């Protein structure tokens, strides 16, 4: 135990001169704070502004009235020309924009809705799925009487002669007790409104960024531990203490400043599961770094793979989208991806956090097992 403590304090003093550790420790809270400051007010504050361009030839006053009815605390639709919409969306002032086709009314009457609406997006657009659903619902409400009229004629319920007598009924608004109500809720039964959905997407994106940064740090830590394990001092001590026991205090010393930075970063994301998930993720990453550091062929390629790791993380985990929607194979990989467990734990699930901790402890224990004499002789 004394050896571990002395090694830990010695390694901790070395960390004060580690430029890489300070870069990661400062980058985590600074980057997260900057993103929260720049993006959170637009998502969590007032309504998301959506510009709408309606050409004069579109004759879509009725459709605009439906959009106005749905303007509120979540989404606010405002009319503007195309240049204004493109400029405001590109600058991030408006989340997205809608552009109606020049022959909107004619195509709506013909029930030809393909390409009737154009959605203008930027890289920073976050609430566009909600806007798409709202615009589609308004379009369906707008062409609803035409659809009903066409159905009555096709089914033989009405004829061209009797159809005019039914026009009032086709445009009649149902009373509230006869309307179909759609209520959103989470898996655990809690109510979910559109504003919380947007906030959850933003929170998951930030958590994913934190997790990817920590993963990159763990890869570089593994390479540092493996390189130190090949030094003359480490080789002389390995037969006495074991290679894994030599690496453990160095790994913990390197993790301490990163853990403090991670906790500060987690405080910027108010959620019940963020801090426990971040700690569980760190435990797993320490175990992963230790087990990889024991094999030169594994950790030596990490610096080369580092640029590709963020892309792989986005593809194989539900940070931005469900990988299963792209490929069943990616969906299977995502299910068993530790990064997915971290995101689930950050949403408040207890089992994924416990599983990450168990995986980290298990990997750490495996790294402490001495190599066989035959394997040491080969080295």
Image: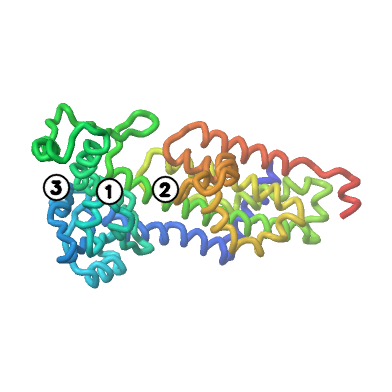
Name the N-terminal-most of marks 3 and 1.
Answer: 3
Q: Outermost residue, top direction?
A: 177
Query: In the rendered structure, which disc, 1 or 2, sits on the residue that comes first in sequence?
Result: 1
Mark toward the viewer: 3 or 1: 1
Q: Give the label, 2 or 3, closer to the camera.
A: 3
Above or below — where is 304 with respect to 276?
below
The C terminus appears in which quarter of the rendering? bottom right
Whether residue 348 sits left or right of residue 214 in the image: it is left
Tell me where residue 348 appears, x and y as whole percent: 42, 36
Instruction: Give the residue drawn at x 73%, y 42%.
Output: 368
Residue 233 % position (x, y): 78, 58
In this rendering, is residue 261 above or below 176?
Answer: below
- The residue positioned 36% from the left and 34% from the top of the image is 186
Residue 31 screen position, x and y as percent: 42, 61
Dot 3: what SS? helix
Label 2: element kind: helix
Q: Earlier in the sequence, mark 2 or mark 3?
A: 3
> Mark 2 highlights which residue?
204
Q: Quadrant of residue 103?
A: bottom left
Q: Position of residue 94 (x, y in %)?
A: 25, 62
Front one among 71 and 210? 71
| Residue found at x 35% / y 64% | 122
Q: Residues within 10 Å of mark 1 (few under 14, many from 20)?
A: few
Which residue position is annotated with label 1?
A: 136
**Circle 3 is placed at which residue position?**
69
Report whether 316 appears left or right of 263.
right
Mark 1 or mark 2, whichever is nearer to me: 1
Q: Residue at x 19, y 56 (%)?
A: 77
């Amino acid at each position: 135990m004394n050896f571990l403590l002395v090694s830990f304090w010695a390694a901790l003093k070395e960390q004060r001169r580690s430029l890489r550790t300070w870069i990661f420790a400062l980058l985590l809270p600074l980057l997260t704070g900057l993103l929260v400051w720049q993006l959170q007010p637009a998502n969590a504050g007032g309504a998301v502004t959506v510009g709408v361009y309606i050409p004069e030839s579109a004759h879509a006053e009725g459709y605009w009235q439906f959009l106005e009815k749905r303007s509120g605390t979540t989404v606010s639709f405002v009319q503007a020309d195309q240049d204004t919409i493109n400029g405001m969306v590109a600058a991030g002032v408006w989340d997205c924009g809608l552009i109606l086709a020049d022959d909107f009314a004619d195509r709506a009457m013909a029930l030809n809705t393909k390409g009737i609406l154009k959605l203008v997006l930027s890289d920073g657009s976050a609430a566009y799925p909600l806007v798409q659903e709202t615009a589609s619902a308004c379009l369906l409400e707008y062409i609803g009487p035409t659809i009903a009229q066409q159905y009555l004629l096709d089914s033989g319920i009405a004829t061209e002669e009797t159809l005019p007598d039914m026009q009032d009924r086709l445009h009649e608004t149902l009373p509230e007790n006869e309307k179909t109500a759609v209520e959103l809720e989470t898996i655990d039964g809690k109510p979910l409104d559109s504003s919380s959905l947007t906030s959850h997407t933003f929170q998951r994106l930030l958590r994913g960024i934190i997790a990817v940064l920590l993963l990159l740090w763990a890869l570089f830590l593994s390479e540092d531990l493996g390189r130190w394990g090949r030094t003359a001092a480490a080789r002389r001590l390995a037969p006495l203490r074991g290679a894994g026991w030599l690496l453990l205090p160095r790994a913990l010393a390197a993790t301490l400043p990163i853990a403090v930075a991670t906790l500060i970063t987690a405080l910027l994301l108010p959620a019940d599961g963020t801090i426990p998930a971040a700690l569980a993720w760190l435990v797993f990453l320490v175990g992963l770094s230790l087990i990889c550091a024991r094999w030169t062929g594994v950790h030596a390629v990490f610096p080369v793979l580092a640029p590709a790791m963020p892309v792989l993380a986005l593809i194989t985990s539900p940070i931005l989208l469900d990988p299963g929607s792209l490929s069943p194979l990616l969906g299977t990989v995502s299910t068993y991806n530790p990064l997915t467990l971290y995101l689930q734990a950050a949403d408040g699930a207890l089992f994924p956090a416990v599983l990450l901790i168990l995986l980290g402890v298990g990997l750490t224990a495996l790294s402490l097992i001495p190599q066989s004499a035959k394997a040491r002789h080969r080295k």
